[in-house]
Image: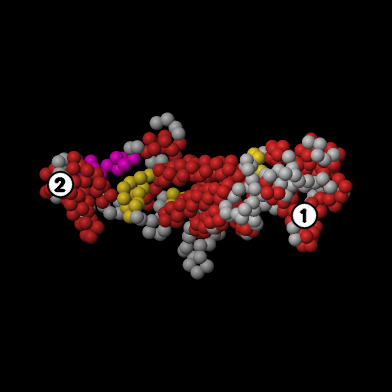
Amino acid sequence: MIERYSRPEMLKIWSPETKFRIWYEIEAHACDAQALLGVIPKENAKAVWKANNIKFDVKRIDAIEAVTKHDVIAFLTHLAELIGNDDARFVHQGMTSSDVLDTTFNLQLVKATDILLADIDALLSSLKKQAYKHKNTVRIGRSHGIHAEPTTMGLTFARFFAEMKRNKQRLEVARQEISTGAISGAVGTFANIHPSVEEYVCKQLGLEAEPISTQIIPRDRHAAYFCALGIVASSIENLALEIRHMQRTEVLEAEEFFSKGQKGSSAMPHKRNPVLSENLTGLARLVRMAVVPALENVAQWHERDISHSSVERNIGPDTTVTLDFALHRLTQLIDNLVVYPDQMLKNMNKFNGLIMSQRVLLALTQAGLSREESYRIVQKNALKVWTDGKDFKTELLNDPDVKKALSKEEIEDKFDITYHTKHVDYIFARVFKESK
C-alpha cells in the first residue's frame, strides 16, 4: 500500500486512529452489555464512555506496546490512563484479544466493501453510457487476435458491464460473508462471558454474531472475501487489456485520453502510451496476490494460532486500498476513452470482405452442397485474399462452383453488414434488463 495508489476515504478505514476507535467501541458496548446482566456496575460501564470524545494517542499506545509486546494490552493500558484505573477495571472482562481484533477486522472489511460497491456502481454507469453511445458502432470481432466477424463497440462495453454487474453481486455476497463478529472469550466457549454480550455488541456494530467461533472467527469467510476481490481485479485487467489492444498503433480503434502537456516517452516525443490500462493490469496482479495467502489462512492449529495475523495486517489494507484506486481509475479511463469509429471500419475492411466467409459457407450448404464441399470452396477463395490480396466477393462471383449454387444477388447479399447487428437490441435488452 503506497500513497501513489491510495485514496483518502479508503485509507482512513485502515488508519490506526480508526482501528483504535473501533476497539474502544467494542469494549464500551461490551461493558454496557455486562452491566445489563449485572456482571459489572452500571457506573463503571457508563464511565468507559468518558473517553468517547477523547482522541487516542497512537504514539503513546505504540510506546506501551514496545514494552508489553501486545497491541491490545497496550491499548487497554492507554484507555485506563484516560478514564482512570478504577473505572477501567471491568473493561475487557471475560474477553480475549481476538474478540476485539477479529470483530474489528471484519467491520473494517465491511466498511471497505461499501466503498468498493460504490466504485463499481460508478463504473457500471460509465460502461452503460458508453455502451449506448456506441451501440451501433461496428467493429471487427476477433478470436485468437485474428479478424473473425463483425460486432459493435456497444456490445463490447455491454459485455464488460455484465461482467462488472456480476462482480457487484459477488462483492455483496462477500460483504455478507464477512459481516460477523465474535465476543466469545478464550477458545470460543463463552465460559467467562455471556453469549448475550456478543449479540449486543454485534447489533451495535451492524454485524451478525458468528454462529460458532473458536478463539477466532473462521477464516474460510475471509478466504471467500479475498477471492471475490481477486475476481474483480481480474475483470479490471480483462477490460484494461482490451483497451491496450485497441490502442496498438496497428489497431488504433480507441485510445486513452491524452491530456494537454502529457508526455508519452522521455526519448520519443511522438509516443502516446496506454499507461493507465497498463497500470491497471499491474494493480490487478497486486490484488490477486492476496488470494493464495487468504486461502492458506483457513488452516489453523486447534482453536487458533497467529499464522493468519501478519498476513491479514497486510492484505486487508493493501487489497482494498489498491482495488478502490483501480476501480476509480478505470471509471475515469472509460469516461474519457477516445473511440475511432472510422478506424474500426477501416480495420474491418482490411481483408476485402473475407470476414463474411461463414455466411457464404452457410448459404452453400443451404443450396444443397455438403458442408465439406462448401468449406473447401470458400476456403479456396479465402486463401486468394490472404496470399494475393484479392477481393473476396469478386472471387466468389467468378467461381464456377459458387455460381452454380448461388445467384449474383444471393452472393452480394452475404456482404450486408447489418446482418451481423440485427440482434444488438435483443442483447442490450437482456444485459440492461429493458424491454425489447
Q: Is residue 174 left or right of residue 160?
A: right
Cα–Cα gap, marks 2 and 1:
86 Å
Image disc number at residue 54: none
Residue 418 part of the magenta segment: yes
Q: Badge 2, how many Cα within 10 Å: few under 14, some, many 20+?
A: many
Residue 384 position (above or below residue 111)? below
Q: Amino acid at mark 2?
A: Val
Q: Horizontally, is 273 left or right of 5 in the view? A: left
Quadrant containing the C terminus is top left
In the image, is residue 172 part of the stretch drawn in magenta?
A: no
Q: Residue at x 81, y 39 (%)?
A: 39
Residue under circle 2? 402
What residue is disc 1 on? Answer: 73
Instruction: Judge whether residue 336 can be spotted in this image.
Output: no
Determine crowd level at label 1: few under 14, some 14-19, many 20+ residues with C-alpha closer than 10 A.
some
Residue 42 makes an appearance in the image: yes
Percent x, y of residue 160: 45, 45
Q: Can you tell which quarter of the image residue 3 is in?
A: bottom right
- Quadrant of the frame with the N terminus: bottom right
Where does the image place residue 378, in percent across and percent down from the top left? 20, 50
Where's residue 20, x and y in %?
74, 50
Q: Nearer the N terminus, badge 2 or badge 1? A: 1
Q: Residue furthest top?
A: 435
Q: Amino acid at mark 1?
A: Ile
Element class at badge 2: helix
Q: In the shown orientation, is residue 424 left or right of residue 365?
A: right
Q: Which residue is at a point 15% across and 46% down the rendered structure image?
A: 402
> Which residues are the magenta region?
408-421
Seen from the viewer's position, the closer of residues 25 and 388 is 25
> Callout 1: helix, strand or loop?
helix
Dominant secondary structure of the magenta stretch?
Answer: helix
Residue 350 point in image, percent of width and height: 30, 54
